[in-house]
Image (cartoon, helix red, strand yellow):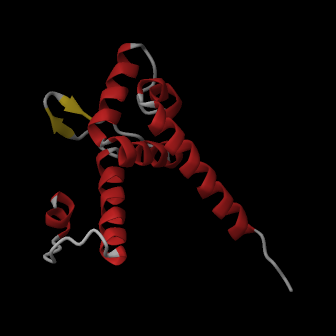
Amino acid sequence: KEMQTRMGVKDKYDPFDPALNAHLGVGYLRYLHDIFSAKTDLGSNLHTVPVRSAGQLEKLAVAAFNAGEGNVAQAQARARREGKDPTDYDAIKPYLPASTREYVTRVTSLRNEIDLGADSTDIA
């Protein structure tokens, strides 16, 4: 409902509508890219640390898509307290749930496969 409101979607939410779910999912991913591109206050004295690298931004957004932006911001804060770079996914990865680390690995791997497939030309 929050994403529907944020995106101005007035339709009643239907969990079985693939087009609506894809639209809202892409909107949420865009939102995550935006909040990890700038310092964003998430409330409860929690904020994101801006990421400049496109590759790192993608990984943090995917992690937040799975675990929630607050959990990723908390992982960034923990990394910073440990003297690590909070904009580097590998630095915050230990502070994320195992299921999220696995999710980011799967999504990244699939994205790389798609990229490699798009680079090759299949001439019949």
Residue shown at 35% from the left, 20% from the top:
78
On-image quarter of the N terminus: bottom left
Q: Is residue 50 left or right of residue 108?
A: left
Residue shown at 45% from the left, 25% from the top:
85
Q: Nearer the viewer, residue 24 or 51?
A: 24
Q: Position of residue 75 (x, y in %)?
A: 36, 27
Residue shown at 53% from the left, 39% from the top:
102
Residue shown at 43% from the left, 14% from the top:
83
Q: Is residue 119 left or right of residue 79?
A: right
Q: Nearer the viewer, residue 21 or 71?
A: 21
On-image quarter of the C terminus: bottom right
Q: Position of residue 18 (x, y in %)?
A: 36, 74
* Quarter occupied by residue 71: top left
Q: Is residue 18 left or right of residue 45?
A: right
Q: Nearer the viewer, residue 53 or 31?
A: 31
Q: Is residue 21 left or right of residue 62?
A: left
* Quarter occupied by residue 77: top left
Residue extending farthest to the top is 82
* Quarter occupied by residue 46: top left
Residue extending farthest to the right is 124
Q: Position of residue 91 (x, y in %)?
A: 49, 26
- Above or below residue 100? Residue 14 is below
